[in-house]
Image: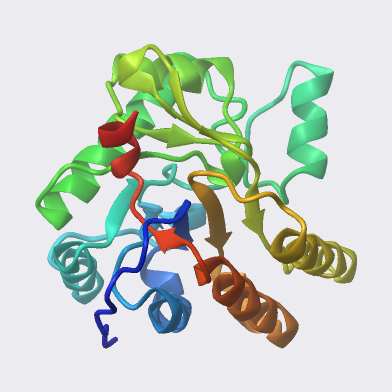
């Protein structure tokens, strides 16, 4: 991918963009989404959310061609977040609220929603060690699959001293007693059913025109988005709309400005 550097205009609201579910299986989709980001952002000022072993069948292997690419992306300036371990949710959920989230907010991908503290901590620690060994630098933070965290995951985040985390509605600093750094919903898309495609297209259209601009507005895309042309068109339009009068930044800037 080729980046072209654009001069920064007057400082506008900080915009944060990310590509989720990055791993060996999604490499082609990540390339396509990266090219789309670069056309609008002009430089690799966005984040990748890395899954160490997506659904237990796409392991991230040190020394592999994909690991080399991941290191290259990090060297270019793209921020790297740990994004779970498997991404798949196989937990038995005790509470009705957790069962509702697992069933209706994600297609069985909220891996960290039902994990106990010990399991969450182990996966976070092993995942961070693996990704950091490959990219040669600390990860920027941890973002749970489907943005869903259980109590065990939140406690493990604090104990492991991750700098940043986010969910659907906020970004916070676990290493600073969960200090909130940014608020507001993530603009994102869904490709797994016709109804979810339609609803995400409608929400994105509203966000482009009606959502009040605020610092650290967030936009997240997924590999599955490239399978639906209407979603790609919507992402393209949304990036274009947000770029006008705004500045795409990086998550780590939140720690420097708050």
* Horizontal arrangement in the rendering, residue 48 relative to residue 182 (left or right): left
Q: Residue 230 in the image: x percent, y percent?
A: 74, 83
* Horizontal arrangement in the rendering, residue 117 relative to residue 213 (left or right): left
Q: Up-down: is 165 above or below 32?
A: above
Q: In the depicted view, which residue is nearer to us: 225 or 27?
A: 225
Q: Residue at x 29, y 74 (%)?
A: 43
Residue that sits furthest to the right in the current view:
195
Q: Residue at x 40, y 61 (%)?
A: 248
Q: Residue 32 in the image: x percent, y percent?
A: 46, 83
Residue 57 shows in this picture? no
Q: In the depicted view, which residue is nearer to us: 209 or 132?
A: 209
Q: Residue at x 54, y 71 (%)?
A: 223
Q: Residue 77 in the image: x percent, y percent?
A: 20, 63
Residue that sits furthest to the left in the current view:
136
Q: Residue at x 50, y 70 (%)?
A: 243
Based on the displayed image, in which of its 4 quarters is residue 159 positioned?
Answer: top left
Q: Up-down: is 2 above or below 196?
A: below
Residue 245 shows in this picture? yes
Q: Residue 207 in the image: x percent, y percent?
A: 72, 59
Q: In the depicted view, which residue is nearer to us: 62 or 172?
A: 172
- The N terminus appears in which quarter of the rendering? bottom left
Q: Up-down: is 140 above or below 66?
A: above
């Amino acid at each position: 991918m080729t980046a072209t550097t654009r001069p920064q205009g007057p400082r506008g609201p900080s915009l944060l963009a990310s590509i989720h579910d990055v791993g060996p299986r999604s490499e082609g989709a990540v390339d396509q989404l990266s090219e789309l980001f670069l056309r609008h952002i002009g430089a690799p000022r966005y984040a990748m959310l890395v899954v160490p072993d997506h659904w237990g069948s796409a392991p991230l292997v040190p020394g592999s061609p994909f690991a080399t690419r991941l290191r290259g992306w990090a060297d270019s300036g793209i921020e790297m977040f740990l994004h779970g371990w498997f991404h798949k949710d196989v937990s038995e959920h005790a509470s009705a609220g957790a069962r509702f989230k697992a069933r209706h907010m994600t297609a069985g991908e909220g891996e960290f929603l039902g994990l106990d503290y010990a399991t969450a901590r182990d996966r976070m620690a092993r995942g961070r060690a693996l990704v950091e060994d490959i990219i040669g630098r600390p990860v920027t933070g941890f973002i749970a699959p489907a943005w869903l965290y259980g109590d065990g995951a939140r406690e493990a985040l604090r104990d492991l001293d991750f700098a940043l985390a986010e969910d659907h509605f906020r970004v916070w600093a676990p290493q600073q007693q969960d200090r909130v750094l940014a608020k507001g919903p993530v603009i994102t898309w869904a490709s797994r059913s016709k109804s979810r495609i339609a609803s995400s297209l409608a929400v994105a259209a509203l966000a482009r025109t009606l959502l009040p601009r605020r610092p650290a507005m967030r936009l997240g895309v997924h590999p599955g988005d490239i399978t639906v042309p209407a979603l790609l068109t919507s992402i393209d339009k949304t990036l274009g709309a947000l770029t006008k009068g705004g500045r795409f930044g990086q998550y780590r800037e939140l720690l420097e400005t708050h």
